[in-house]
Structure formats: C-alpha cells, structure tokens
Image: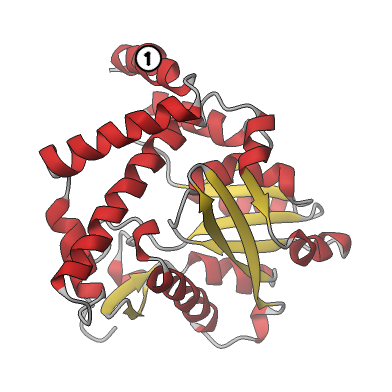
Amino acid sequence: MKILSAILYYLVIIPISLLPFPVLYLISDFLFFVIYRVIGYRKAVVFNNIKNSFPEKTEQEQLEIQRKFYHHLCDLIVESLKTFTISQKQVLKRVTCKNPELIDAYFDENKSVIIAGGHYNNWEIFAVAVDKIIKHKTIGIYKPLTSKFFDEKMRETRSKYGLLMIPTYEVKHYLEKYKNVPTATIFGFDQSPSNPHKAYWTKFLNQDTAVLYGTEKLAREYNYPVLYGRINKESRGHYSFEFFKVTDNPKDTAPGEITEHITRALEKDIRAIPQYWLWSHKRWKHKRPEGM
C-alpha cells in the first residue's frame, strides 16, 4: 500500500503540483465537468445539506448554491495539490491578514491564544501561510490520516513554513511544552464529532447539530483568549483572513458560551456566502441523543 501511495504522490500529485496556477485552473474547470456533470460526486449529500440548511430558498436557489460549491471545491482540490510544492514567496502573495494587529497585541503581552475556525474557503493554504503572517508560534490540531504515508506528507506540507502539526491526542502535552512561548493553537471545530454523547448540541443552519467541545474545553482550562478566524476568498487563488475576538477570559464565561459564539460566527459567514463551506461533508449524520 505504501508503494502505491508513493507512486501516486511522486508520479501524479507532485507533477500536477508543479504546474502554474493558470494551468491548474484549467484542470479545475475540467474537474468540475467530471465531478459535477458526469460522476455527480456526493450530489445527494450536498443538495440535502443545502436544502435543510436553507429551507426558505427556492429549489432553483438551492441548486445554484450547489453548482457554485462544486466550482469552489474543484478550485480547492487543485489549490491543495499546489501546497505540496508552493514556495513561501508564492504563499505570501496569495494569502494576507486583514487585521494582524488584533492578534499581535496578545503576542506583545506574551499571551497565548486559541484560534477557532471552520472548513470555510481554503484552510489548506491558510495552514501553510499563517505562521509567517502572525507573530505567535502556530500550532495546528489535526486528526491523523489512515494512510501513514499521506499523513506524513500532509504534515510536512502544512508545517514547512512554521506551523507545528499536533494530533488531537497530544494537544495537552504540547500546550504544556510551549507554555512559556506565546502560541496560537488552531482548532477546526465544525467536523462531526465521533461521539455525539460527548458533543455540545445546538441549532446550526436550521438543524440539530453536534459540535466539538474541545476548543472551549482547552480555552477554559488554560484561560487562553479565544479568537474566531475567518478566511475570505478575494479572487480565484487569493485569500485573506481576519480575526474576531470571542473572549479574553474563558474562565469567566458560562459553559457553552464560547462554543455558541464561534458556531454563530461560522453560521453567519456561511449564510452570507454559502458556496465556500464544505457541503460534501456528512455533517448531520448523528441525531441528538435523548436527554442531550
């Protein structure tokens, strides 16, 4: 299996990754035709998610969101492949921060922070760029891939310009290790939790939704200020991100308050421009358990 993964990586992924962006977007346009028009990859999942999230919209409007999502998804695929070989100079031309002064102020006070974000726009290129754009030592929390080969390549790619990639089960160890260094720990909080009984339940996009509680749990335990991070698509292949303060003192917040705040912030972004969220994810596969 490792040999097949290596062949795929070195003979397919890397040659595609080395192509210039204009050529990659031609590939993206072709992928859209294949994935959307021919294969219909997860079309039923995507449409059902959109329909349930926007019941007030007409079917035509829902289908338009779906079509735009697949265009964005194909761009996301080729842009993610590009991150394997993208140079630091290219990254910094394509990713900017609108308000670095908000987070840098915490660094100047020697304070670590937690950044909460969703799978909205291109989180892969954000991961490659973020450590070079803000002052904090950045830590990315991730769930290891099944393939050890691609897990290693993914970690190498995301961390090549400074981001420290930490699997979920080692988070506390590394927070203790870097407790004397101002860190920015990045959580993607919009995945579907593996255990719905340990999740925080709320209404999100018109549906009962289980939300990962790890962001709030660690924020309250370490009392690290929490920021919501939003990634904006400025144009094809160009992104910006910006920060919004959630709380400076997590220990002073009520249980669930932080999780509600970041969930509502992401929901607002999705409602504003829905095609940039990851609709192909089976986000609502769990039902709310009785008593939750």
> Callout 1: helix, strand or loop?
helix
Q: Looking at the image, is 66 positioned above or below residue 73?
A: below
Whether 133 is drawn above or below 194: the answer is: above
* Lateral position of residue 70 relative to residue 138, left or right: left
Tell me where residue 285 appears, x and y as whole percent: 20, 63
Instruction: Please give left or right for residue 103 compared with residue 17 in the image.
Output: right
Task: Tell me which colouring the rendered structure shows.
Answer: secondary structure
Q: In the rendered picture of this protein, how many numbered marks are placed on residues?
A: 1
**Height in image: 78 above or below 85?**
below
Seen from the viewer's position, the closer of residues 172 and 55 is 55
Q: Quadrant of residue 160?
A: top right
Look at label 1 and name its amino acid. Answer: Ala
**Left or right of 47: which side holds 273?**
right
Q: Residue at x 48, y 32 (%)?
A: 154
Residue 200 in the image: x percent, y percent? 39, 76
Q: Which residue has dot 1 on it?
A: 6
- Image quarter hosting the C terminus: bottom left
Quarter of the image for residue 192 reads bottom left
Image quadrant holding the N terminus, namely top left
In percent of the image, x 22 and y 69: which residue is there? 61
Q: Residue 250: which quarter of the image? A: bottom right
What residue do we see at 20% from left, 38% from top? 33
Residue 8 in view of the camera: yes
Residue 135 shown left or right of residue 159 in the figure: right
Who's the residue at 64% across and 62% down the image?
242
Q: Residues within 10 Å of mark 1 (few under 14, many from 20)?
A: some
* Residue toward you, 107 or 51: 51
**Is 244 or 249 nearer to us in this picture?**
244
Residue 105 at x, y percent in the picture? 83, 65
| Residue 280 makes an appearance in the image | no
> In terms of depth relative to the viewer, which is nearer, 28 or 213?
28
